[in-house]
């Protein structure tokens, strides 16, 4: 008998309630009206005794925790306000209610799988500074490398296995030339795809155009051009469109190639993730291209992070919604917060405030006066978000499929996934989780919620949760059960889990509280800096303008570092500033970029741009 695991609203277990009450303190428990309280309560640390030392961090996701980490190390007294009863935001894992028996833990659920590309450098640095028993490099030691990706094709078409191996003999600095790069790209496309030769050659040329474009052209020209138009996908074969257009945008970052910024797609996905990753340049030490954690995210990373931050004096107020950032007299004077059910309304105060909420929630807390004080806050209304939410399948049989991620290229819902149990080398899944039946955790993500599926002919937003699960399962089987093999069997499926942040499915107003920033053309111009015009108010989050640019955990961490540095400057602090790693810039391309800068100023196209 197949059991679909039921979901319950968060915050109903005793542990979460105890944590909330402990964090909020008796001073505010049971208060029906609104009161003003200090951000630290009775347990103020000595570090907060002097002015300019208390910081309220709004949001306990990756950006909020990163900011709290950097501030605590510099002696600030920090309190983090978080909507959920657990920390980590979209990165956290969560217990599936009612699934544990005996001494096992509940089955692990999540918003969507986490992965840590090798070009991440800011976030890995933070991870190294989070202690973990037995790991000399902290929770960073819990990262495991995937060795390949599977591009699964539908309707019985042969799948593509893409090995994640560095080039064994990368060129010397004086040998990395445009012709060498073009040859490598053509070689990969020739071996791995069925693209016509002229289409492969054209795509290789377009990459050279982007690689050698100066920063001014990237920001002034390619930020305004869609990836679809840049690679002329509309004039090419369906194979070209699926592999090099849709597969690089919708399936990876939940944005459509038809609207995605060329600057973002070309710079981060094509250059940093793939090209420089394969060459082993600009990477986190000797990291491989793609890495995942060796246990559920909260076990391997978020929970140890919380423990470490508490040891540094950081306080957490969980189950708390930020309602309004209050502005007056040229400064932020407090923040109105409340419990999720609207009770215990109060205003908290601090010397500095770091807004680390996702943009769709942050901008709702910025009133007219605050927006008038800094026009960049109002421009955030133009930033777009979309759905990119996962479903976890729990299977009776180990089903690793591939040691890495699965990209179902032909799936109308842009489905990606990964078999997680194979990477959890310190876990025995059936022994440690659930009721002992499940032996595999297949984590999948739907990135396209607005196209009809293959089972019901409805979009994901139009489906009920049960219909989404059935449709998603059918699309997975279409991609994986072919070429004479049966990878997924209906009888192996024990249950599933979807983030309870998704509500109202099958009804007139489906809602997803945890959306993802997407990158249509000209998005860059609306993204704010971490420093605002308000001297005690700072922004952190993957929507903030960073060097990594893409909405990622790396971007969230980098933005937090920038926010902390701006706060230190405003506070005239003598503390060392946070180091910020930027994306790799190959020195061999710099002379060509300087030539392009002159051409761009003169209104001329890039040297390699043949139209």
Image: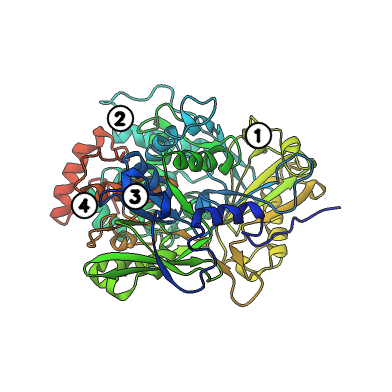
* Residue 210 on image: x %, y %: 31, 47
Residue lying at 24% horizontally and 33% vertically, measured from the top left: 587
Report the side of 522 relative to 10 (left or right): left
Report the side of 246 relative to 63 (left or right): right
Q: Earlier in the sequence, mark 2 or mark 3?
A: 2
Q: Which mark is residue 422?
A: 1
Marks 1 and 3 sit apart, C-alpha to C-alpha, by 33 Å
Considering the image in quadrants, where does the C terminus appear?
bottom left
Of marks 1 and 2, the one in the foreground: 1
Return the residue at label 2.
176
Q: Earlier in the sequence, mark 4 or mark 1?
A: 1
Of marks 1 and 3, the one in the foreground: 3
* Residue 552 on image: x %, y %: 43, 49
Contact between marks 4 and 1 (CB within 8 A): the answer is no
Marks 4 and 3 sit apart, C-alpha to C-alpha, by 16 Å
Q: Earlier in the sequence, mark 1 or mark 2?
A: 2
Of marks 4 and 1, the one in the foreground: 4
Residues 434 and 264: in front is 434
Q: Earlier in the sequence, mark 2 or mark 4?
A: 2
* Residue 288 on image: x %, y %: 47, 31
Residues 177 and 34: in front is 34
């Amino acid at each position: 008998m197949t059991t679909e695991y039921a979901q319950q609203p968060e915050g109903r277990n005793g542990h979460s309630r105890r944590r909330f009450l402990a964090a909020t303190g008796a001073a505010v428990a049971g208060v029906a009206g609104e009161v003003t309280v200090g951000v630290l309560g009775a347990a103020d640390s000595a570090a907060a005794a002097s002015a300019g030392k208390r910081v309220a961090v709004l949001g306990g996701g990756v950006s909020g925790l990163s900011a709290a980490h950097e501030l605590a190390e510099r002696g600030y007294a920090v309190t983090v306000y978080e909507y959920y009863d657990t920390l980590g935001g979209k990165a956290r894992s969560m217990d599936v209610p009612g699934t544990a028996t005996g001494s096992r833990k509940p089955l692990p659920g999540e918003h969507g799988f986490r992965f840590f590309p090798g070009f991440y450098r800011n976030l890995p640095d933070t991870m190294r500074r989070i202690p973990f028993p037995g790991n000399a490099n902290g929770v960073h030691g819990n990262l495991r490398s995937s060795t390949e990706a599977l591009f699964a094709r539908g309707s019985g078409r042969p799948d593509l296995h893409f090995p994640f191996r560095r080039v064994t003999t990368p060129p010397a600095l004086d040998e990395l030339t445009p012709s060498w790069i073009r040859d490598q790209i053509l070689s990969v496309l020739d071996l791995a795809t069925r693209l016509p030769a002229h289409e492969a050659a054209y795509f290789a040329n377009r990459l050279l155009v982007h690689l050698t474009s100066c920063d001014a052209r990237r920001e002034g020209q390619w930020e305004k051009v869609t990836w679809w138009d840049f690679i002329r996908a509309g004039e090419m074969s369906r194979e070209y469109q699926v592999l090099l257009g849709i597969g690089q945008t919708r399936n990876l970052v939940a944005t459509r190639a038809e609207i995605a910024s060329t600057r973002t797609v070309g710079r981060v996905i094509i250059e940093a993730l793939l090209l420089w990753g394969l060459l082993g340049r600009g990477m986190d030490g000797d990291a491989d291209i793609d890495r995942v954690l060796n246990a559920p995210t909260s076990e391997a990373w978020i929970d140890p992070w919380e423990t470490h931050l508490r040891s540094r004096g950081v306080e957490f107020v969980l189950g708390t919604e930020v309602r309004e950032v209050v502005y007056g007299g040229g400064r932020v004077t407090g923040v109105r917060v409340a419990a999720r059910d609207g009770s215990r309304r109060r205003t908290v105060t601090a010397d500095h405030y770091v807004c680390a909420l996702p943009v769709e929630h942050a901008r709702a807390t910025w009133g007219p006066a605050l927006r008038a004080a800094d026009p960049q806050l109002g421009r955030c209304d133009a930033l777009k978000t979309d759905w990119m939410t996962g479903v976890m399948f729990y299977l009776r049989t180990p089903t690793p499929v591939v040691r890495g991620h699965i990209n179902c290229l032909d799936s109308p819902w842009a489905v990606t996934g990964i078999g997680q149990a194979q990477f959890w080398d310190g876990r025995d899944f059936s022994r440690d989780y659930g009721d002992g039946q499940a032996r595999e955790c297949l984590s999948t993500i739907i990135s396209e919620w607005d196209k009809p599926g293959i089972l019901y002919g409805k979009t994901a937003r139009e489906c009920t949760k049960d219909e989404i699960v059935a449709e998603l399962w059918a699309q997975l089987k279409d991609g994986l059960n072919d070429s004479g093999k049966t990878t997924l069997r209906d009888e192996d499926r024990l249950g599933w889990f979807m983030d309870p942040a998704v509500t109202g499915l099958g009804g007139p107003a489906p809602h997803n509280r945890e959306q993802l920033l997407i990158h249509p053309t000209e998005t860059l111009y609306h993204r704010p800096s971490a420093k605002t015009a308000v001297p005690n108010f700072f922004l952190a989050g993957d929507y903030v303008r960073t060097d990594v640019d893409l909405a990622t955990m790396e971007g969230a961490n980098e933005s937090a570092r920038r926010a902390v540095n701006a706060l230190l400057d405003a506070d005239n602090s003598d503390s060392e500033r946070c180091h910020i790693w930027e994306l790799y810039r190959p020195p061999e391309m710099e002379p060509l970029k300087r030539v392009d800068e002159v051409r761009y100023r003169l209104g001329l196209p890039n040297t390699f741009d043949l139209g």
